[in-house]
Image (cartoon, rainbow, N blue to C red):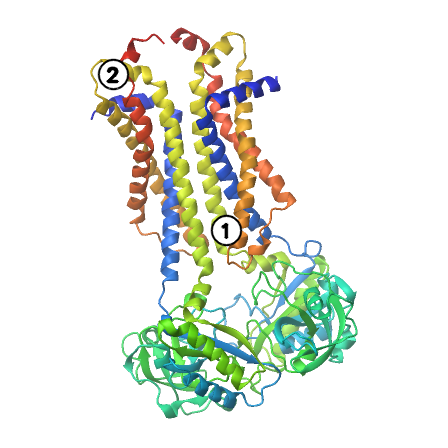
Amino acid sequence: MFAYYARLAARSFRRNKVLTALMVVAIALGIGASMTTLTVFHVLSGDPIPDKSDRLFYVQLDPAGRGGYVPGEEPNSQMTRFDGEALLREAKAERQALMSGGGGTIEPDGSTLQPFSIDTRWTSADFFPMFNVPMQYGRGWTRQDDDGRARVVVISKALNDKLYQGGNSVGKDIRMDGQSFRIVGVMKEWNPEPQFFDLTTGSYGKDEDLLMPMSTSMDLKLGSSGNMNCFGENPDRDSYSVNAPCTWLQYWAEMDPGKADDYRRYLENYSSQQREAGRFERPPNVRLRNVMEWLDFNGAVPSDVRLQLWLALGFLGVCLVNTVGLLLAKFLRRSGEIGVRRALGASRGQIFLQCLVEAGAVGVVGGVLGIGVALLGLFAVRQQPVDYAKLAHLDGSMLLLAIGLTLFASLAAGFLPAWRAMQVTPAIQLKSQ
Amino acid sequence: MDIRPILSTLRRHKTAAALIVLEVALTCAIVCNALFLVSQRVEKISMPSGLAENELVMVRVSGIGKQTNGMARTREDLASLRAIPGVTGATIINQVPFRSGSSSSSIQRQQDQERPTTEASMYTMSEDGIRTMGINVIAGRDFLPDEYMDYAVVSKAGSTDKALPVIFSQATAAKMEPDGSALGKTYYMGKQPLHVVGIVDTLTTPTGWDDNWNESMLMPLRRGFDEGGTYMLRTAPERRDEVLKAAVAALERNDANRLMRDKKTYEDQRNDYFKNDRAMVGLLVTVSIALLVVTALGIIGLASFWVQQRSKQIGIRRALGATRGQILRYFQTENFLLATLGIVLGMLAAYAINLALMNMYELPRMPLLYLPLGAVLLWVLGQVAVFGPARRAAAVPPAVATRGA
């Protein structure tokens, strides 16, 4: 039966080539545009660390002065060095890491390479197991290295390729900003997108090529990059000193999601103690958000991308309405033919099915073309000068979604015209022939 | 023309008519909003900076290793840069309009105020900065030569009782003194008093952070190249490339062991900053055109179907004496009526979408001007699309009426 309907559909397409082409093109454009933006949206709103995102929490305290305090107000988005180091010392979570972005100039020794600047991250030992950092050679550093301000670093695959042609460089010395550091580990390709653990240095397309203990970088006064927010009088005029009233660090804690309430109480207690000691001026005001909550709160998906998504869905809507109209015209134009088939004994259901097969065929061809359009669209997105450009690729799950969307779209577009066609009354059609 | 026969025909083709109306309405709603978004972006892209944009080039360098005397090297650099043929001014500045990341400071009227009056972007620059950058002083004066100090010295000393001179942008001045002139007044940056010596008409902030694009201020504080300073050079527009090359060479001559971080014309800096907005404008325009094309194709398809379906009635009308022009106008009027209905619905939808966007993306309200604009666009589109099928209808010969079908 299906094969017969398919033959009928093919014959009908041949009869109305232009109309058929119009419908196919409309569906292809609609599917292509919406798949392009859906893919970008999917890539940008994805979970950067799916197996742990509910176990990793971003910690915020409120160390700001009393001035202008509004109860319930969002506390400072980053942490002071004093609080970060205190929480790290107390180590109340399963794992914890203090961190900040930084930068430096690598001085390759003796080779033909010129000095070049890189982005870096200053952090603490737990960073590597917490964020599942994959290692090619060696390992991350230890808490003893943190405590001893050891001159050790972990470098990225890219930096290792550039300086050591991809060989095992563990144990070698690397020079940066006039200092020498021992390489203890080389990472595999690792680039979570968005770079959720620090959203202050740009969320997409970031490459940090070197990681060093926070304590070492502070010891050597290597500065930081990202946002710094200072409040109140600074006693020793150095924004990086332990007692500076400046927030510029990110603090992450790993724990069982069930323990989050206990940890929150611990942070409140800590805040109260700091207030009693005269450091904090505000009542405890803490936040503890897991990875996805933190990304959501920061609007990590650019609002332009959301806007494009709505625009493309609207476009798909117009294309569908257009296809409904054209299919309706097509089916009703064949009212005479349908009348004859009905008179010869075809049931309404059979007419309905036949029309739906025809609509489905248009949809499938349009959908396949649409996936082509989407690939072209994503290619165009990758040429755009936006920082998430290189992430725009169609993956397996989006391909499945594209197929689903196509089937849904073509059947939805075919439903109304097929319904109308099935109600053609044979008597009137035959009479007017 | 009598529209009653048209209406009674349409009543018998409710579904197809409703589909055309729906398509026109959706297109109208989306295109109105897309055009509005485009105009918003274009307005943003063409925002003035307050600088002599097409006469400036910028170079940022950073040292390798610790700099022992950055300020002395910066003075040498500036002297070498001024000596380049074609350079009419050179200064070192901490930040420029339209870049990522900005430095700002709160200002208050009273020293012991709990909440500052406003937050202004703080530009600091060395001698001759205002003239070099082409910033327009509209009240008061430029900084005097003896007012310039080293940023490092001032920040190390901390707050003092001695007021520092400052120049406000017009917007900052208006915020501090809504009813009078801020010129000559004293305000506070934390505990540090500031004395307003001048006002400039426009000096845009680097990032528009916190929706502040125009509240800024200038201070006569020199920053070394090793303290985040950027060299700015002024020259004639056609000599920019040549001056840029000479500037890089001069800086390398002064100290070969430095990294060139940025070397570009200010125009490039600006274009780079707005690249996302330009990409978005391109996308919105593309989608709008595609929408209009799809809608036009839909109208052509349905109108052709109607013409074919009614060719017998058309033949009869022709046989009864209707002219070709009357048949043509029949289909044109029909399309006009459908488009009008679609446009009315589309305007309501456009308004609703705008309200939703206002909630979600803090967009401003769409000016009502966009509604008639969208309407005219779709009327014209409908008429262009229907012209072909209508002409085919007018070409139906009266003899069709006599053929038994």
Quadrant assignment for the N terminus of chain A? top right
Residue B317, label in figure = 2
Percent position (x, y) of residue A400? 62, 39
Relative to B58, say whether B192 is above or below: below
In the drawing, does residue B339 fall left or right of residue A322? left
Residue B381, label in figure = none
Q: Depth-wise, is mark 2 or mark 1 nearer the camera?
A: 2
Percent position (x, y) of residue B140? 29, 83
Percent position (x, y) of residue B106? 44, 77
Chain of residue at mark 2: B
Q: Residue B120, can we see it?
A: no
Percent position (x, y) of residue A49? 67, 56
Q: Residue B360, can we see it?
A: yes
- Between B227 and A270, the one nearer to me in the picture: B227
Kind of element beneath mark 1: helix
Q: Which residue occupies 38% across, 9% down?
A: A432
Relative to A145, say whether A359 is above or below: above
Local crowd at mark 2 within 10 Å, few (<14), some, or many (≥20)?
Answer: some
- Which of the 4 image quarters holds residue A155? bottom right
Chain of residue at mark 1: A
Dot 2 amino acid type:
Arg
Kind of element beneath mark 2: helix
Quadrant assignment for the C terminus of chain A? top left
- Between B264 and B308, the one nearer to me in the picture: B264
Task: Determine the CA span between mark 2 and mark 1.
Answer: 53 Å
Residue A306, label in figure = 1
Dot 1 amino acid type:
Arg
- Between B110 and B88, the one nearer to me in the picture: B88
Relative to A228, say whether B308 is above or below: above
- Which of the 4 image quarters holds residue B65? bottom right
